[in-house]
Amino acid sequence: MSIIKVASQSRTALVAGAIAGMYREKQEAVVQAIGAGAVNQAIKAMISARGFLAEEGKYIVFVPSFTTVMVNGQERTAIRMTVQPQESNGKAPSVETDETPVEWDEDNDSEMAYLFGGDQATSRRQ
């Protein structure tokens, strides 16, 4: 599987062209990003690619998932977005993932502090 890897410095127009080109060729494209800036660029590129393909009568959906990748010997969590044809019923196709759902416990302050980065969890409740 070919993966389009996006960085925070990636030019969205070039990534959009790569997504549209891969989709035209394979009827699917996979975009992967690590970090907020990279995910931002990837989403903007997918929106542009959607516009390019819609002009050709090809309608797509993006199905996000998490994946674990190794970067410089360290495990990192990446966002993977699979670009697929939109089904005629308007529903997004399902994508299998190997991730287990995370339970959210709003009453557990230590978990919230971890998820929101320290004191942000308590200040959010005030």
Image (cartoon, rainbow, N blue to C red):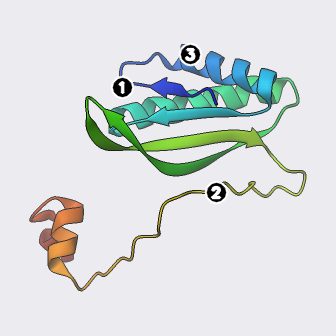
Image location of residue 33, percent across then percent down: 43, 34
Q: Residue at x 31, y 81 (%)?
A: 105
Q: Is residue 28 above or below residue 97?
A: above
Q: Name the residue under label 2.
A: 96
Give the residue number, with chain letter if any, for mark 1: 8
Asked which quadrant contains residue 97, the reply is bottom right
Q: Residue at x 14, y 75 (%)?
A: 110
Label 3 packing within 10 angstroms: few (<14), some (14-19), many (20+)? some
Residue 126 is at least partly visible in this image: no
Comparing 3 with 14, the one in front is: 3
Query: Disc 2 residue type?
Result: Glu
Q: Quadrant of residue 40?
A: top left
- Dot 1 lies on which element? loop
Looking at numbered disc 3 in the image, what kind of residue is underneath it?
Ala
Report whether 3 appears left or right of 68: right
Identify the element where label 3 is drawn. helix
In percent of width and height, residue 7 lies at: 39, 24
Going from N to C along the chain, the mark reached first, 2 or 1, is 1
Q: Earlier in the sequence, mark 3 or mark 1?
A: 1
Asked if residue 39 is positioned above or below residue 8 in the image, the reply reads below
- The residue identified by callout 3 is 13
